[in-house]
Image (cartoon, helix red, strand yellow):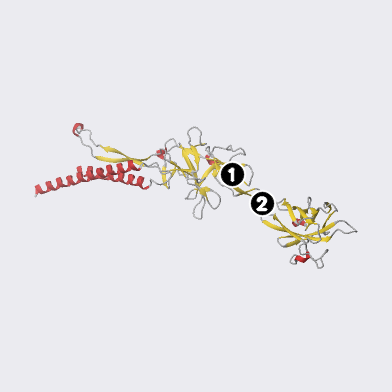
Amino acid sequence: MSMSTALSGLMAAQTEISTTSNNIANVGTMGFRGSRVEFSDVFSTSPFSATRTAVGTGVQVQRVVQDFSQGNVVTTGNLLDIAIEGQGFFALQQLATENAVRGGAIYSRSGAFALNKDGYVADHGNRALLAWPVAVDGKPLTEDLVRAEPLQIPMQRGEPIPTSMINIAATLPSSATALGQQDAVPPTKAFDKADPTTFAHHTVVPAFDAEGKGMEADVYFIRTASPSVASPDTSYEMRMFVDGIERVASPAATVTFGADGRLASGAAHTFGGGIDTMSLDLTGSTVAAAPFAVDTAGHNGKTREQLTNLDIDNLGGVWATYGTGQRVALGQVVLATFSNPQGLRSLGKATFAATAESGPVQTGLPGSAGFGALRSGALERSNVELTEELVNLISAQRNYQASAKAMETSTSLMQTIMNIRT
């Protein structure tokens, strides 16, 4: 009897040492919840035994309980690191991979998130943070966990608009000697963009194609007429190349300036045809006694707006800014609680699954009644107190040694009895 009693003490002490060792090993694990062992004595009696002289028969491990108290929150500076200050768990969902499919929600206090290759806000295990869809003002459209979706941050927004109009306001030289390398007015040879003697000036304007990709529009100015006794006008012909391919104007694109240097005719022209049509507007251009210069240049094309800023507020609202526009609401982070968190089943990697013992999941908005607030750019560390765990380890070690000594004593007594018989 004493042997089995001492053995139960050894096993109980070993369980406590293992639990304490696990706590110490995970003292640096973000979001880790420490555990403690609860014991109960074993006391066996029969209806005819004398209870006043009955002796217990050992100890047993009643349960290993996890501690869900708040851990220390440390600042990291990483926007997608999120700490919960108060009650609640992040709701996560395993993203589909080559060997896995999406499953039900799992829960964690670890908020070390980052964007994966598909733009999902996920942890190191490719588990995405769940969020509710929101209206334009950021208010959630539902608070049902079933309708929560993995939070995805698009890197781009909007639809591209191909460039169909280029606007150039240029200053063209009035002097017949400020024609670049053009050999004569008009040139003596046919236009060739590779031959600078066939044109006077050249400028490049950026543009976008139908997919929003950048391309270059090269505009060449050819002096075709200079002021004379017969006519005070100055004329230029324009040629346009887009990504090296010429877009022809029909009739030829010619602009004329009067004696005062202002536009007289030909301010707007169309180059190409069909889906490749591109217009050139020279409104604001002048002829002056000055070198060639492009005062302003622009176009009406538009590429997809790039993500320029991301923000997660204390109430779990996720906001993004694209380009220089206004903030756009992308989602509302989900928080979950349980009536009995100790009933959750640990899945490792600081994650948990709901069980019948934990009770049904309850979801709500961060900062509302029963739910903690969120802090972006910070992480919650393990709630393990290292000094306390070291003391517990010493205590468990002494209990183990004492039980081992009791077993040794019981063995010696049995040996003594055996020696009496012999």
Residue at the extreme bottom: 189
Amino acid on which the number 1 mark rests in the picture:
Ala
Relative placement, left or right, of 52 versus 162 is left
Q: Is residue 325 above or below residue 367?
A: below
Residue at x 10% of width, y 49% of height: 419
Report helix, strand or loop for mark 1.
Answer: strand
Nearer to the camera, 62 or 122: 122
Query: Label 2, label 1: how many angstroms apart (C-alpha)?
Result: 18 Å
- Residue 410, position in %: x, y? 17, 45
Q: Quadrant of residue 328?
A: top right
Q: Position of residue 336 (x, y in %)?
A: 48, 38
Q: Nearer the viewer, residue 360 or 97?
A: 97
Q: Residue at x 73, y 62 (%)?
A: 245
Name the foreground residue: 288 vs 38: 288
Between 132 and 137, the one nearer to me in the picture:
137
Which residue is identified by label 2? 303
Q: Quadrant of residue 237?
A: bottom right
Which badge, 2 or 1, is on the more N-terminal residue? Answer: 2
Q: Amino acid at mark 2?
A: Thr
Mark yes or no: residue 361 visible: no
Q: Secondary structure at mark 2?
A: loop
Q: Is residue 123 visible?
A: yes
The numbered dot on residue 251 is none
Q: What's the mark number on residue 320? A: 1
How far from the left and from the top, in percent, is residue 129?
51, 45
Q: Where's residue 341, x and y in %? A: 42, 38
What quarter of the picture does the N terminus occupy?
top left
How many labels sit on residues?
Answer: 2
Q: Report crowding for label 2: few under 14, some 14 to 19, many 20 or more residues within 10 A (C-alpha).
A: many
Q: Residues within 10 Å of mark 1 (few under 14, many from 20)?
A: many
Q: Is residue 289 above or below residue 369?
A: below
Image side of residue 19 versus residue 84, left or right:
left
